[in-house]
Amino acid sequence: MIRCHLSRLMGEKKMKVIDVARETGLHRNTITLLYKETATRVDFETVNKLCELFECQVADLFEYQQE
């Protein structure tokens, strides 16, 4: 199972979905799906924009956990 830590990163910077959408140019629905960990796929461009915004590595955003 892949865990997404977007909600934690957003909380640390006190950002809302609309703030992330405005800063990255990503659609709010894409960010919401990642925030709620209900996304089934993610584009590299999306990951790149989020890593740039939060100044983090991919491993800070996503984590693999065995079920």
Image: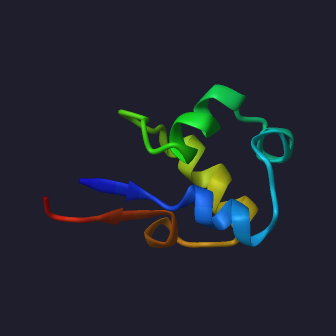
Q: Residue 52, percent across and down?
A: 70, 62
Out of 57 and 37, give the one closest to the viewer.
Answer: 37
The colour scheme used to paint the residues is: rainbow
- Image quarter of residue 63: bottom left
Residue in view at x 51 percent, y 62 percent: 5
Residue in view at x 61 percent, y 36 percent: 32
Q: Residue 17, percent across and down?
A: 75, 42
- Image quarter of residue 8: bottom right
Out of 54 and 17, give the one closest to the viewer.
Answer: 17
Out of 50 and 31, give the one closest to the viewer.
Answer: 31
The image shows residue 16, relative to residue 51, as above or below, that is: above
23 sits to left or right of 57: right
Name the residue furthest left: 67
65 sits to left or right of 12: left
Residue in view at x 73 percent, y 72 percent: 12
53 sits to left or right of 57: right
7 sits to left or right of 36: right
Q: Residue 18, percent across and down?
A: 82, 38
The image shows residue 4, relative to residue 31, as above or below, that is: below
Query: How many numbered markers are drawn?
Result: 0
Q: Residue 58, percent across and down?
A: 48, 65
Residue in view at x 53 percent, y 35 percent: 33
User: Quarter of the image containing the C terminus?
Assistant: bottom left
